Image (cartoon, rainbow, N blue to C red):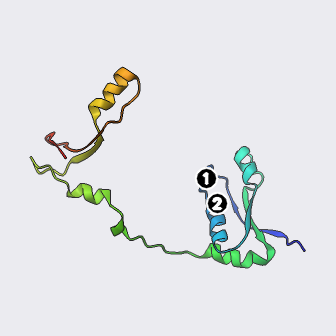
Amino acid sequence: MVERLVTIARFAYSADPVSEAELARIKLESEGIGCFLAGKNFAGVYWLASLADRGVKLQVRESDAERAKEVLGRREKVEIDESEYGDSAAEAEEVRCPRCGSEDVKYEKFSRKVFYLGIAFLRFPVPFPRKKHRCNNCGEVWK
């Protein structure tokens, strides 16, 4: 016997591939609840008229409806261990100019000269690696 699909949530269409509707669908599927986004294609093609069709509807089997509502209602706290990822903002604060001691330092990945010369002569930028620090205060350049 085929079970009916029940709409448990409605979402306004968003062109973002990771929209609220997609996140809800992914959350339910990660819990083992089969679901379907009705009206997603219509909303993608006729985005102005999607609200007239009441947006994108998240549908599940009638027997899974209560459990799906419970899963969507849960708020999960995720903690990220920042020590294993390099924090570029923290690293930029630690860098000081060796000449004047200023913290106003910029890290340059590519050579500006080669970049602009490429635009002038070749009509497209040439990203030539440089990887140096430049002090915005005194102009000192170092590795």
Q: Quadrant of residue 139?
A: top left
Judge left or right: residue 139 versus residue 92: left
Tags 2 and 1 in contact by the CB under 8 Å rule?
A: yes
Q: Quadrant of residue 132?
A: top left
- What's the residue at 19%, 47% (across, down)? 143
Residue 122: horizontal and vertical position, in percent?
Answer: 38, 23
- Check disc 2: other Cα within 10 Å, few if <14, some if 14-19, many if 20+: some
- What's the residue at 67%, 69% (across, down)? 29
Residue 12 vs residue 90, the one in the foreground: 90
Q: Which residue type does callout 1 highlight?
A: Pro
- Kindly state the secondary structure of the residue where label 1 is placed: loop
Whole-number angstrom distance, CA of label 2 to CA of label 1: 7 Å
| Furthest residue in direction front, as rendered | 129
The relative height of residue 22 versus residue 74 in the rendered view (above or below) is above
Residue 77: horizontal and vertical position, in percent?
Answer: 49, 75
* Mark drawn on residue 22: 2
- Residue, disc 1: 17
